[in-house]
Image: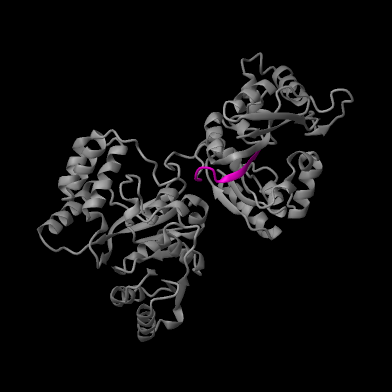
Amino acid sequence: MPVRSEAHLLRRSLPSCYAVDPDEVILCLDDPPHEETLSEAKRISARLGYASKTRILPVARNDQYRFHQAWVRRRGFREAKHDRILTVDVDLVIRRNVLKAVSLVGKDDIGLVSCMTLHSVRGPIALWRAIGHRLANLFIPPAFTGLYALWRPFWLNTENEGIKDLADPRAVSVKGDPGLVGEDAYLFNCMRLRHRCVHLPDVGGRSLRDDFNDGPEVQFEIGRYYATKSDSLGLVLIRSLGLARFHYLRGYVYHMTHKMANSSQTPKTKNHSEPIPQGKTREFWSRAVPMTFDDQPKTYDEKRRFRYELQDYMHEVFRFDSFADKRVLEMGSGAGIDSAEFLRNGAKVVSMDFSLMSTRSTKSLFREAGLDGDVVMADARFLPFRDEKFDVAYSFGVIHHIPAVSAVLDEVKRTLRHDGLFMGMVYNKDSLLYAYSIIYLHGIREELLAQGTSELEIASRFSERFTGNAYTKAYTRDEITKLLRAHFRSVSLEPKYNVIDTVGKRKVKFQLEKLQNELGWHLIFKASK
């Protein structure tokens, strides 16, 4: 429960929390705490016999977060002893049926469950709104509210760094942005991309304050938001009249008549509503995470030694030791070995993958190696980071598996700072492995080409350790150069890794005196913004 100088509200809300008999109650107070609020919290917990189960957590301001309330709540999430967490605002008197929400999270891929809250009814307009909400909930699922339970492991794997750029929707300085969203709604928007979110029609609590969304200025901004979503005038009119929020219509008409540009979902961040790839691609990379060695368990040191002995050019080419104090984004981290190498050498790393298994593997490897890096589950086509955040973007063996690669490069360019570096590896179509191991052994010898199977399909099927990969495109030097130069000002390439796959063994190394690495399977690229 985040609490500011609100002792008068705490007197009514805190006893309702104790009434559901929780294992732990965390009160998140501003640091330094408001004396009256602190005293009241201690008095109530002692009087009701919950002093030993109550933790008072002073939370100092964090400069990385624009919206202090967002940081306060997330600090509480991290400090909780249990993964099932019910978050309650200080102005809510909760009912015992909130325990239903708590019992559901963590099961059947459910990450968040919210309960309906009621607001006080004072006057005919408030009564109109209350009736409108109740009628609306008979035909559509109840809207997300600030009274919700969450499963902490799913929260940690979904919410991205955009939360740090979220502005306080109550601040005067951010009025006029139709993309404003509360910090709890932001959490919900991130969670629902990857896990189930459930809204219960049960009344879980009663608010001691008027609904913030009833304010004329907030209604106006919500109306503008409906316009950005291209909602019809009729639908907005029904909402406006049904909920007695007449400024919805004013904001909608204002936005449409002024032909304003649609804003992103949150200030200075990208819209995160696009779906993460599903189906065969995600399924394959969830069961075939590179360098995890699930079938042959290895320690971190053994994994590291194996990777850099097998691909012995990597330290020389990528210079992991030259990015100390630089912000590095790895896209497609796999087991996290390269991210760990950047961290070992002093870089500030965000390790990203769209596979839950990969992000878990990376976190596990970081813990084993004693390294501290951020791990994010996200889609490379829709990077959840603000503009010009990183000095370096690194992607080893990833973008050749993405059909919409131009969208990825647009995002890389957007998130790189001026003079930022994008480097990585794609498969080399002009390599001996492609010609012999893929085209000859499978395309010609197995007669797949004669059967009408395309080179792209053959490469997709046989380029990896396991069959079943949905997409792999090997690039010629001209193809990858043209692609990168459409987004970056300078590009350099270097083939490496002279290997072939034989019938009985993968990655057999060979030496060529004259051509050296020209026929290498890995085509290393470096591109500057």
Q: Identify the image's colour scheme: rainbow, by chain, secondary structure or one colour.
A: one colour
* Depth order, front residue of 162/364: 162
Any magenta on residue 392? yes
* In this rendering, position of residue 147 left or right of residue 286: left
* Depth order, front residue of 317/118: 317
Any magenta on residue 319? no
Is the C terminus in the top left, top right, bottom left or bottom right quadrant? Answer: top right
Q: Residue furthest top?
A: 450
The magenta stretch spans which residues?
Answer: 385-396
Residue that appears at 44% across and 43% down: 272
**Residue 138 percent coordinates (x, y):** 21, 50
Q: Is residue 29 among what the camera can see?
A: yes
Residue that appears at 20% across and 36% down: 233
**Residue 149 percent coordinates (x, y):** 40, 61
**Residue 223 percent coordinates (x, y):** 25, 44
**Residue 309 percent coordinates (x, y):** 81, 43
Question: Residue 282's quadrant in the figure?
Answer: top right
Above or below 208: residue 108: above
Above or below 434: residue 50: below
* Depth order, front residue of 1/161: 161
Is the N terminus in the top left, top right, bottom left or bottom right quadrant? Answer: bottom left
Above or below 486: residue 7: below
